[in-house]
Image (cartoon, rainbow, N blue to C red):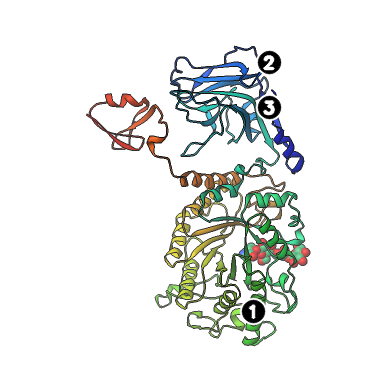
């Protein structure tokens, strides 16, 4: 046991995440020549000549390691009893399995497949997923490997760990479990959310709202701060949950407070993240000098005065961050909740605006904004923003419009209308503050696609889901939709930790200690799945094929499991599906 993983120890000194390790096997207490059982997972016989035996380290004869040779033994792994008193449940309290791997130079006839898998009893907890099959790194040298696995419920008293191949040779040492305090280790980028989004290379962002300054839970100037690390390691987009709203950024007329935004922009630049600006024109969180009422122009400003206030506000902020803030929620929640009159066929292309200082004080024809032209506050807000930063993407943002219904139709009508008027709008935000169990995923997909037909991007802008038994599944579904829908460019979580959420329903991915919840793993799985699908498979003839196949008839019924590939030729005459392709047996 010489190749101790110093890296983990070093990392733990410099980060807030001390990793705890449990050594399972270093083979030092075994006699050279001790055999470990080789187990074939589907239960086929292990190929003759295969073995797993304690041997001397090929690079250091004083060190003992496990030497594995597989001959015609697809799906075969060494089997290790769990230590006395150490259960499968104990195993699952850790998040990663780590080991040292040595692969000698490739042997003739070696069709080395190089895919690591870990099983607890008969349950797979990890398998490297990659259509190209991973490059395990250089041969003839010891390498450190570490894989995050998925916990399972089992009473197994053994585990399997090895590389998946038909014929291959490798050595293992120092098999150990690594526990990260937070349920995952954010210092390992392959365990984070942004890693998989960025690997897909489709330009999408996974974002998060950073808590208000007075909550005092994030230090944007300190990259060692725990919440800062949680944010920049997992997300590649940030939004200020409150601090860029009118009341906080222009608390008195013409006096701007840019401290938080400056720090957020600098934080994002340091960590290669984008910033969404939220929000330029909203009926809430306005300073008293603009209005003391959410639905009235309480100071009776003239239309021109309000336009001037809006122009100065938007122009000052957007110009200051030109080129630094990628996109803006320009107009937020401008639609009335009740779009009831849309039932009248004559109104089917229209929308109702909510009463606000902006709609009442600026809009000339308030109830039917459809007929308004340049004087309307929505048009003006978009123009001011566009003039200040022609490259920034500009969005409407609203709630209750995500999965269909009258307000969703009104939202579509409004966006379409803005496009027809050539207002510089690039997309719409679907906030997605969901209650438990109400997700209509088909409706969400329809709504996203409807905006694509208008040439608009869609951003999931404020995702949170009230906790329930299905919370993780619902997060997974939405993350899949985000990744699958081409025009769904970004997905933003509305807060980091449940502790600081504006809702009391534990609706986020991290708990009060910033530990990852099942919802985190569900989102990560969805992002990872898309990454795996996005990597083009190598041509069939360039990768080794499993010698065992499942065979289906043309009706899609499985007629044989794990049949040796060459045996397919001896099936009755007919057409079969093998590895997704038709095979004719004559
Ligand atoms: O400003 C005071 C501050 O001075 C005081 O110290 C603090 C003490 O609790 O309260 C502060 O006001 C709070 C404000 O957030 C800032 O934290 C309000 O009480 C609180 O109601 C307000 O909530 C925010 C809410 O918008 C306001 O409508 C939430 O944090 C924020 O998450 C929420 O975000 C909105 C989006 O912007 C738009 N879509 C809906 C979403 C959820 O409501």
Label disc, if present, on residue 3 of the rendered structure: 3
- In the image, residue 551 sits, relative to residue 290, either above or below, namely above
Helix, strand or loop for disc 2:
loop
Residue depicted at x 68% and y 27%: 3
Residue 35 location in percent, x, y? 57, 14
Binning the other alpha carbons within 10 Å of mark 3 as few (below 14), some (14 to 19) or many (20 upward) gives some
Binning the other alpha carbons within 10 Å of mark 1 as few (below 14), some (14 to 19) or many (20 upward) gives many
- In the image, residue 404 sits, relative to residue 150, either above or below, namely below
Counting residues from the start of the chain, the first of labels 2 and 1 encountered is 2
Question: Quadrant where the N terminus lies?
Answer: top right
Residue 237 location in percent, x, y? 61, 57
Counting residues from the start of the chain, the first of labels 3 and 1 encountered is 3
Nearer mark to the viewer, of 3 and 2: 3
Identify the residue under disc 2: 29
Question: Quadrant where the C terminus lies?
Answer: top left
**For the residue with label 3, is its CB less than 8 Å from the closest atom of ligand 1?**
no
- In the image, residue 8 sits, relative to residue 286, either above or below, namely above
How far is mark 3 from mark 1, CA to CA? 64 Å
Quadrant of ligand 1 in image: bottom right
Residue depicted at x 59% and y 77%: 384
Counting residues from the start of the chain, the first of labels 3 and 2 encountered is 3
Q: Are marks 3 and 2 in contact (CB under 8 Å)?
A: no
Identify which residue, 283 or 383, lies in the foreground: 383
How far is mark 3 from mark 2, CA to CA? 16 Å
Identify which residue, 342 or 111, lies in the foreground: 111
Identify the residue under disc 1: 310
Q: Quadrant of residue 323?
A: bottom right
Image label count: 3
């Amino acid at each position: 046991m010489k190749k101790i993983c110093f890296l983990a120890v070093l990392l733990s000194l410099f980060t807030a995440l001390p990793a705890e390790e449990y050594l399972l096997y270093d083979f030092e207490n075994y006699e050279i020549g001790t055999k470990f059982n080789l187990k074939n997972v589907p239960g086929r016989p292990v190929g003759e000549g295969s073995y797993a035996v304690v041997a001397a380290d090929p690079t250091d004869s004083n060190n003992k390691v496990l030497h594995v040779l597989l001959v015609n033994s697809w799906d075969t792994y060494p089997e290790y009893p769990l230590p006395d008193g150490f259960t499968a449940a104990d195993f699952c309290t850790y998040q990663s399995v780590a080991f040292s791997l040595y692969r000698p130079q490739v042997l003739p006839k070696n069709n080395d497949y190089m895919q690591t898998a870990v099983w607890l009893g008969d349950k797979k907890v990890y398998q490297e997923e990659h259509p190209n099959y991973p490059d395990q790194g250089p041969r003839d040298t010891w390498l450190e490997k570490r894989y995050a696995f998925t916990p399972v419920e089992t009473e197994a008293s053994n585990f399997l760990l090895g590389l998946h191949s038909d014929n291959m040779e490798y050595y293992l040492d120092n098999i150990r479990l690594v526990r990260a305090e937070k349920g995952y280790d954010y210092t390992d980028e392959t365990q984070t959310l942004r890693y998989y989004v960025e690997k897909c290379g489709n330009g999408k962002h996974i974002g998060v709202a950073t808590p208000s300054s007075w909550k005092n839970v994030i230090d944007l100037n300190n990259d060692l701060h725990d919440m800062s690390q949680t944010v920049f390691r997992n997300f590649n987009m940030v939004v200020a949950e409150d601090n860029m709203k009118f009341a906080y950024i222009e608390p008195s007329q013409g006096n701007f407070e840019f401290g938080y935004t400056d720090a957020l922009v600098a934080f994002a630049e340091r960590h290669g993240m984008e910033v969404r600006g939220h929000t330029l024109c909203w009926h809430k969180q306005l300073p008293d000098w603009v209005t003391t009422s959410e639905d009235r122009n309480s100071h009776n400003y003239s239309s021109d005065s309000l336009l001037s206030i809006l122009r100065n506000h938007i122009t000052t902020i957007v110009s200051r961050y030109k080129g630094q803030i990628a996109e803006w929620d320009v107009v937020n929640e401008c639609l009335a909740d009740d779009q009831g009159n849309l039932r009248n066929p004559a109104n089917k292309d229209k929308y109702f605006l909510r009463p606000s200082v902006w709609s009442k004080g600026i809009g000339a024809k308030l109830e039917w904004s459809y007929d308004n032209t340049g004087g309307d506050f929505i048009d003006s807000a978009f123009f001011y923003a566009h003039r200040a930063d022609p490259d920034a993407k500009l969005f409407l943002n609203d709630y209750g419009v995500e999965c269909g219904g009258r307000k969703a139709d009104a939202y579509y009508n409004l966006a379409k209308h803005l496009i027809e008027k050539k207002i510089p709008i690039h997309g719409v935000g679907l906030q997605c503050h969901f209650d438990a169990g109400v997700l209509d995923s088909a409706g969400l997909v329809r709504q996203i696609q409807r905006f694509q037909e208008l040439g608009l991007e869609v951003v999931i802008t404020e995702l949170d889901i009230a906790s329930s038994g299905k919370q993780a599944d619902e997060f997974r579904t939405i993350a899949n939709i985000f990744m699958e829908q081409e025009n769904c460019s970004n997905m933003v979580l509305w807060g980091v930790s449940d502790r600081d959420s504006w809702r009391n329903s534990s609706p986020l991915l991290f708990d009060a200690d910033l530990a990852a919840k099942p919802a985190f793993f569900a989102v990560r799985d969805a992002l990872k799945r898309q990454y795996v699908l996005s990597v083009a498979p190598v041509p069939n003839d360039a990768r080794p094929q499993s010698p065992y196949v499942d065979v289906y008839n043309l009706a899609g019924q499985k007629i044989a499991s794990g049949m040796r590939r060459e045996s397919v030729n001896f099936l009755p005459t007919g057409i079969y599906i093998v590895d997704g392709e038709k095979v004719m047996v004559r």
